[in-house]
Image (cartoon, rainbow, N blue to C red):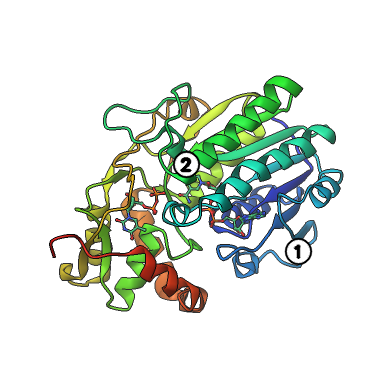
């Protein structure tokens, strides 16, 4: 089954994954008209979309997904919504939970309402493996219960529940993807991998919470974008897909790999106080997306090399981000490990 969509509203595409997705879509489906709606929070950056700006069939609108008037106007001009817009960083959600509830729950509801009103063909919600909570054993399948443990994951779970309610109650043509931890070019340097790389470039300590043993499934962003494209165009309406590689990597293994690629000493690793409510393991059952014909193409070793190279070659992109408010946040967030 393939569905052809002509005018897509992509919310939150000035961020990391959304901007990579827009670039992907321009390459693979140049005939699709794209409207980007983004508030340009601290995590949104027009530089992420500089290479598509000015192209025919592309336009950028600065605005908030909670602004129902604006969202309705844009929904009346499009046939589908893909929503990346969210507050996304767990550590920041511990400092300001309400910003997360506002965008990730209420903003998602505003988008659902507009998609319903304007009879859109598809509403694709980009969700996360974090809705399942900590998974000490086994793998999370799409029908497993949600057990979110941070304000971020609770807000994402809330957004999903609202979207599901719109699908059940009003027939919203819903699709949901739950991706694992993404990495690659244009990731704001507060998430683990870009923190490690940019700190290593500057010879700064590489902070790992507690003992660095928390496990994630690191997914190269282009692989994620291909999966999202495939779900958007091929998945039966109403379905949910986990997206991940099925691999398990600790924070310590990531830091060691970064240092190895860059030829920097292991002594740069610094164990710091743990994140409250830290989820120590996420692991996805990815059989459903595999059955749809998707599989990751970039190994972690290859993706990490590419990512290190990208940050080494794009100081002009990340250096301006690591200033002012960034260091205020950094100082608030990182604390010495007790007993040291
Ligand atoms: P990001 O923080 O890099 O980008 C988020 C974007 O949303 C920014 O451009 C920001 O300006 C915009 N935004 C925030 N609030 C908004 C609002 N109220 N109205 C309009 N725009 C707003 O995030 P990301 O890492 O690219 O993640 C994108 C999506 O994918 C999120 O929904 C996230 O939950 C999900 N996700 C991320 C990962 C990951 O590892 N990064 C994994 C799985 C799922
Ligand atoms: P992060 O990139 O914040 O993603 P997640 O949303 O999955 O928590 O963190 C990935 C993992 O790395 C997680 O176990 C927390 C850990 N981590 C550190 O050890 N040090 C850091 O500075 C950061 C940002 C994360």
Q: Is residue 84 visible?
A: no
Q: Is residue 100 left or right of residue 46?
A: left
* Residue 117 sits in quarter: top right
Mark 1 or 2: in front is: 2
Q: Is residue 155 left or right of residue 300?
A: right
Query: Tag 2: Cα neighbours inside 10 Å, few (<14), some, or many (≥20)?
Result: many
Q: Secondary structure at mark 1?
A: loop
Question: Whole-percent x and y of residue 251?
Answer: 27, 53
Kindly identify which residue carries mark 2: 153
Residue at 55 percent across and 43 percent down: it is: 226
User: Within 8 Å: ligand 1 and the Cβ of disc 1?
Assistant: no
Task: Please tell me the numbered disc located at residue 189.
Answer: none
Query: Tag 1: Cα neighbours inside 10 Å, few (<14), some, or many (≥20)?
Result: few
Residue at 68 percent across and 64 percent down: it is: 52
Q: Earlier in the sequence, mark 1 or mark 2?
A: 1
Residue 287 or residue 339, whichever sits in front: 339
Q: Secondary structure at mark 2?
A: helix
* Residue 4 sits in quarter: top right
Residue at 35 percent across and 38 percent down: it is: 282
- In 3D space, how far apart are the residues under numbered discs 1 and 2 (Cα atoms)? 35 Å
Kindly identify which residue carries mark 1: 55
Q: Is residue 147 visible?
A: yes
Residue 294 or residue 242, whichever sits in front: 242
Question: Whole-percent x and y of residue 156?
Answer: 54, 40
Question: Whole-percent x and y of residue 214?
Answer: 27, 46
């Amino acid at each position: 089954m393939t569905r052809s969509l002509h005018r897509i509203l992509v919310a939150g595409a000035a961020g990391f994954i959304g901007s990579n997705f827009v670039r992907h879509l321009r390459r693979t489906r140049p005939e699709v008209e794209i409207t980007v709606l983004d508030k340009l929070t601290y995590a949104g950056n027009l530089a992420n979309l500089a290479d598509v700006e000015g192209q025919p069939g592309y336009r950028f609108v600065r605005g908030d997904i909670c602004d129902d008037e604006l969202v309705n106007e844009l929904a009346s001009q499009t046939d589908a919504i893909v929503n990346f817009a969210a507050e996304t960083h767990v550590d920041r959600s511990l400092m300001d939970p309400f910003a997360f509830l506002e965008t990730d729950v209420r903003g998602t509801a505003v988008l659902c309402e507009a998609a319903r009103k304007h009879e859109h063909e598809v509403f694709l919600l980009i969700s996360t493996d974090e809705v399942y909570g900590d998974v000490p054993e086994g793998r999370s399948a799409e029908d497993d219960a949600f057990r979110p443990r941070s304000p971020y994951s609770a807000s994402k779970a809330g957004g999903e529940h609202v979207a599901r309610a719109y699908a059940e109650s009003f027939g919203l043509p819903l699709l949901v993807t739950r991706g694992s931890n993404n990495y690659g070019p244009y990731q704001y340097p507060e998430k683990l991998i870009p923190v490690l790389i940019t700190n290593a470039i500057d010879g700064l300590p590489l902070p790992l919470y507690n003992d660095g043993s928390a496990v994630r499934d690191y997914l190269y962003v282009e692989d994620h974008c291909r999966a999202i494209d495939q779900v958007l165009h091929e998945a039966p309406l109403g379905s949910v897909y986990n997206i991940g590689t099925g691999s398990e990597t600790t924070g310590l293994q990531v830091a060691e790999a970064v240092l190895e690629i860059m030829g920097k000493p292991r002594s740069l690793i610094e164990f710091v106080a743990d994140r409250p409510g830290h989820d120590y393991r996420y692991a996805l059952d990815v059989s459903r997306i595999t059955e749809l014909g998707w599989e990751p193409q970039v190994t972690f070793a290859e993706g990490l090399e590419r990512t290190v190279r990208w940050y080494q070659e794009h100081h002009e992109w990340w250096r301006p981000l690591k200033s002012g408010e960034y260091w205020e946040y950094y100082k608030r967030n990182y604390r010495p490990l007790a007993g040291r």
